Amino acid sequence: MNFLVSANTDIGLTKNTNQDCLSVKVINTDQGRMAFALLCDGMGGLAKGEVASASVIRAFNHWVNEQLPVLSAAPIDEEMIKNQWNDIAQSQNRTIQEYGGKLGVKLGTTIVLLLITEEKYFIMNVGDSRAYEISDNLYQLTKDQTFVAREVELGNMTSEQAENDPRRSVLLQCVGASETLCPDFFVGKSKSNAAYMLCSDGFRHEITPQEIYDKMQPDVLLNNATMNQNTVDLIELNKQRNERDNISVVLIRTF
């Protein structure tokens, strides 16, 4: 499988720092080419959210460089990936908590990470950053770990109510701020001629799924320049509609 990738992040309209952090890589392995992407939306007092998000990015980039080549010497073991990713997330949760405790501040970060192989995609999620697959439609691959998402699932709130509820950004879990961390894992069949997108919540509040699909459908993402420009166009549209958060997007186009 072949890949085109792009990554964009914007500080947005009101914040003094960009606490989002992201990474995307294409890797040649014994099991073929793979793409790995990671996006973290940090939060915390004294503008320390970027410390939390950057720490998680470093930890998982180290996994890509050191552990993925070992794992890919044989067919990818799904449980091994899940266990290794969970171990890193748990370790980062403790490390960030300890760092915040020394400073007397609370800080943390969401995580959404994606590995695409020739046969499957693997996703881990904590918080409300999202992963999507875009082919004949826009498919959300992750579930938000938020108060409103839980209320919708329980039948206490409609999706429309959740979109406008002032508690829509209240997280149930956050790396660095949760006593017990329970990441979600998702596995599926990877598609050729598709796009996979990671985004922070700041990217999706002020634009519609149809607007995302129109710009991100694989038929229009034929080169890196178009991928980058279409992402920037949607980021700017969010800002025109007064999105106040940092805005970040990673795109992977498969062939």
Image (cartoon, rainbow, N blue to C red):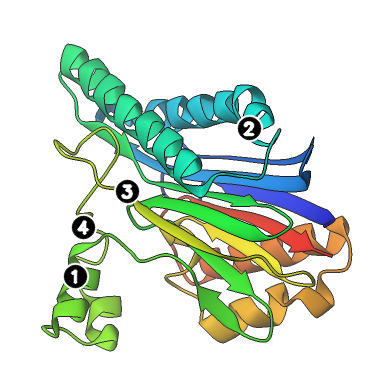
Q: Is residue 143 left or right of residue 4?
A: left
Q: Which amino acid does label 1 sit on?
A: Arg
Q: Nearer the viewer, mark 2 or mark 1?
A: 2
The three-letter amino acid code for the residue at tag 3 is Pro
Residue 109 lies left or right of residue 162; in this view the side is right
Residue holding disc 3: 183
Q: Name the residue under label 2.
A: 68
Q: If the image is split into quadrants, where does the C terminus sit?
A: bottom right
Instruction: List the residue tagged with mark 1.
Output: 150
Image coordinates of residue 113 in percent, x first then y, are 51, 47
Q: Do the residues labelled 4 and 1 touch (CB within 8 Å)?
A: no
Q: Which residue lies furthest to the front in this view?
A: 74
Label 2, label 1: how far apart the Cα atoms are: 34 Å
Q: How far apart are marks 4 and 1 (CA)?
A: 11 Å
- Residue 226: percent from left, percent from top: 83, 64
- Residue in view at x 65 percent, y 27 percent: 70
Mark toward the start of the polypeptide (1 vs 3): 1
Label whose residue precedes the other's in the sequence (2 or 1): 2
Residue 248, numbered label: none
Which residue is pictured at 74% across the width and 56% down the height? 118
Q: Nearer the viewer, residue 145 or 43?
A: 145
